Amino acid sequence: MAKARYAIGVDYGTNSVRALVIDVDSGEEIASHVVPYPSGSAGILLDKKDPNLARQNPADYVSGFLKAVSTAVRTAAKTKKFDAAQVVGLGIDTTGSTPIPVAEDGTPLAWQPRFKKNLAAQAWLWKDHTAHEEAAIITETAKKTGAPYLAKCGGTYSSEWFWSKIWHCQRAHPEVFRAAHSWVECCDFVPAVITGNLDPRTMKRSICAAGHKAMYAEAWGGLPSREFLGTLSPELGRLRERLYEKAVPSDQPAGRLNAETARKTGLPVGIPVAVGAFDAHTGAVGAGIRPGVLVKIIGTSTCDMMVAPGGRKLPDIPGLCGIVPGSILPGSFGLEAGQSAVGDIFNWFVSHLCPPEYAKGDRHVNLTRVAEKIAPGASGLIALDWNNGNRTILVDPLLSGLLVGQTLHTTAPEIYRALVEATAFGALTIIRRFEEYGVEVREVVNCGGIAEKNAFVMQIYADVLDRPMKISRSSQTCALGSAIFGAVVGGAYRTAEEAQGRIAGAKTKVYRPIAKNAAIYGELYAIYRRLHDAFGQAGWSGSLDRAMKDLFALRERTRKG
Amino acid sequence: MAKARYAIGVDYGTNSVRALVIDVDSGEEIASHVVPYPSGSAGILLDKKDPNLARQNPADYVSGFLKAVSTAVRTAAKTKKFDAAQVVGLGIDTTGSTPIPVAEDGTPLAWQPRFKKNLAAQAWLWKDHTAHEEAAIITETAKKTGAPYLAKCGGTYSSEWFWSKIWHCQRAHPEVFRAAHSWVECCDFVPAVITGNLDPRTMKRSICAAGHKAMYAEAWGGLPSREFLGTLSPELGRLRERLYEKAVPSDQPAGRLNAETARKTGLPVGIPVAVGAFDAHTGAVGAGIRPGVLVKIIGTSTCDMMVAPGGRKLPDIPGLCGIVPGSILPGSFGLEAGQSAVGDIFNWFVSHLCPPEYAKGDRHVNLTRVAEKIAPGASGLIALDWNNGNRTILVDPLLSGLLVGQTLHTTAPEIYRALVEATAFGALTIIRRFEEYGVEVREVVNCGGIAEKNAFVMQIYADVLDRPMKISRSSQTCALGSAIFGAVVGGAYRTAEEAQGRIAGAKTKVYRPIAKNAAIYGELYAIYRRLHDAFGQAGWSGSLDRAMKDLFALRERTRKG
């Protein structure tokens, strides 16, 4: 019997970092360890005066890596079979876009005493929204000048993304911008640190971060042109040459683990470290993404990931967050979509509108117990899932929630169910958009706590999406995906797909659509779509005067069973 | 000093009857007594199999009269000044349309042993909705045949009204219909009983009931033609000649109090009894209605009453419940509008969606304490007040509630406030409709518990309606209005207006619009109206894609103060 081989995946979330040790042949998850970031509030640096601000201390990424990996390795070593010397590679995923301003030597400005306390010199966390004005101007400028740069990210640039944040820094905190030689995404920073190559000119840059958030595409020669950036601001134009020319996928090594990191973690010196990627993207890999399979990572919000074979030409798809070659699986197009709020909407309802009779104990469980018995259509309610705006397909953060159909008898569980259904209708809208542009969705693999634990939500999703709902086998999908890339760069597999075939996949439990429910939801979705288009799209011309009557008729019909 | 004179008003509500004794010169309310109806559930006969059914036992009206009036008279007599011999007249108001099938001698069929338990032989309470199919056919037939009968009741006939109910009885319970010689409105039945003239051919019929609910108008010769009714059903056509030719206002006597009733109540034999009317109409009189003053009777739903001078020609006003000469004040047009749910919407919210932190003690008070501090526009929410359909101006029971603008931070008090505002926007829509057709609304007098006790709601109404909100001085406005007609037929005043000048009116406390709030509500109303028209009116062509953004912008602006 051949010696066992291991890989390590390191997953940087919003509040903590997780290290996972796997057996690359069996896929067995040997050990894992989570380290919360020590700085700020749950790892986030906030500003009382500005609710849009969310930063992180880059030092937390380094200390978190060392503690999470070394502990996971030590824990693994307690099993008799594991030997750290047999770790073949390591992969990393992080949140994003989370750019960090760095000095000429690649160290974060935040590590210089004069910038230590300066919030603008820290990592600009993905959910920082201080740059909404810059995002709007970037979108407008691209449209006005006919620049092609938004074609691959749905036509609208976001305040969460690379250039918006950097430009906002230049406008609002010029002293930080001037001191920054370059900017590095978190998912590029961590591999750079642990391989010992911090030089911004030569460190490897992730195609996932570059393509989805920085308007990078080979079609137009990499990053947007100096001219375009210069139209926004001359300083931004000049920054371009201090960034990068080329970005690469995660089946390529960023470098080899340096001696210091190896010593502090107990790993072998020189093992390959994969180029980083975003968490949702490695999560999709860990969940077994392949053409025809949509991976939904469901949490407070969702990421909806697809891949399409890289050989053929793929059209631009309006409203998507991004279409990037190699961003999920090298050699395939990676497609990213998402819903701005899913679990957050359910949590909002139970926090703010749960009546006392459902408030003792787990409110979700109490409401679900009644809500799961309500027949589709029987409440006469329909909702839009926009309490936090709409990410895909409308790309509009200023949209808001809507509930229609309430009577004097409408109950809390009925509304709770309507909100779950609304998120399913939002998910279906994304699937329809994929399919309108030729990307077929045959099945859905769901990841996250809701997917694993909530049969009520998953059955509604099966019925509304009218497709089997599978659940990712691993509950550490993102870290598993990173470990897969660690295994690939470590030579255990030739491709990520080959590794997926052995390691990734779904549980045996599958939620299958119930035909009768799916038919009713088909009718309800037609009403959802009318509301979606009426409130979400300029230039819509239709009518809503039948909406309440259609809901009433459906209610009468479904109540009679 | 002249001897004091008294009048009695008797007000039949949905669950109880109230008798009020007033001093006709000072308006002082000397005594009152309320008697709940003994039959059924809170006075209503229900059918477990049909939630639309609501009937009453006509015997309750007679026993209730005797008990309420005799007790009020005895209570009044305990004051030293009152002497029953000085009661000059008596007036009556009831719910409606509440028709009762009667035998040839005018006694209710329900009093015959064979019909005692037959629900179809009882009084068909105003809120009975068993006849929704008949109502729809009546509306359709009038439209198809070009018959003018719906011109004075807003263009749509209701399942709550006279002909729908009688026709439904004929179709569903032909044995009762065949046994009924005639049908008598509750407000005509009570005066007939106490004056001893039950003969359906000669008893006085209320113009208020006839004009608002039975498509009666002098313009087309009284009730709808035998031909029109015969189109619906030959039996209905034949019934017409067993009903009435003429209906009269309440400043005319229905007759004189008969000896038996006088003996049982302690009142003088032979005092005049005024022709009956509906409760909201006498309520408007008791609140001091006059041209330019809208009287809002706010309860679970509202009635919105106006009068217009009788001399000039008044156009038909689409969407109104009725325009009837003399139905409120003799000599003036009486105009009736209404909202299907107001207090009921607030009660729905606190019953079904009030979180625990506001649930201890009076939930309305707890929510109000926070809601009253929210600036207009600052929640970013807007609602439609249609949880029970829309009575005016859309006349559509199948419409339902709508809430828009919710985020992940929206709170229960914010929604509570939005619902209050929605009912105010509904009220404004009625006022606008009046004014579009030349009926000016200069001030509003509000009646009912919410008006008397709820400064939070009343200030929002003042700000939204942008008019002073007055509160009726009496809290027994309907009974007071009936007493006024008792005083008029008793000779104490020549006209109801003359009596109102002395007796009726508003409290000194007036809620005045705050200009800054009124301006914001003007902007919010524009959004409400877009939603109202989009969801409520066929053929609407407009756009809603700015609605959420306008709410967001308003929120940002008003939060900054």
Image (cartoon, coloured by chain):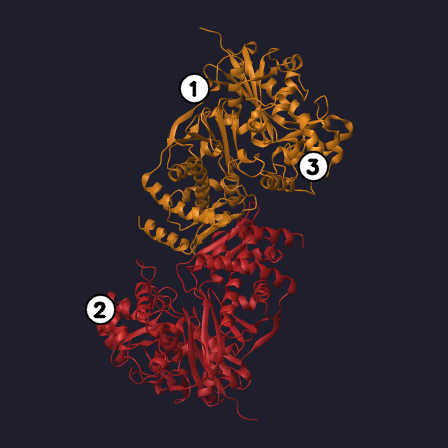
Chain colours: A red, B orange
Q: CA distance from mark 1 to mark 3?
A: 48 Å
**SS label for mark 3:** loop
| Crowd rating for badge 1 (residues with CA inside 10 Å; few <14, some 14–19, many 20+) | few
**Residue that numbered label 1 is attached to:** B501
Would residue B123 be visible to someone looking at this image? Answer: yes
Left or right, B11 with respect to B259, comes to left
Using the numbered discs, state the Cα–Cα distance from disc 2 to disc 1 in whole angstroms.
Answer: 74 Å
B294 left or right, relative to A171:
right
Q: Tell me where residue B83 appears, x and y as whole percent.
A: 54, 10
- The residue identified by callout 2 is A174
Q: Are marks 1 and 3 in contact (CB under 8 Å)?
A: no
Q: Residue B363 location in percent, x, y?
A: 49, 42
Q: Give the residue type that dot 2 points to.
A: Pro
Extreme-right residue of the structure: B114
The residue at which mark 3 appears reads as: B233
| Residue B453, percent from left and from top | 45, 33
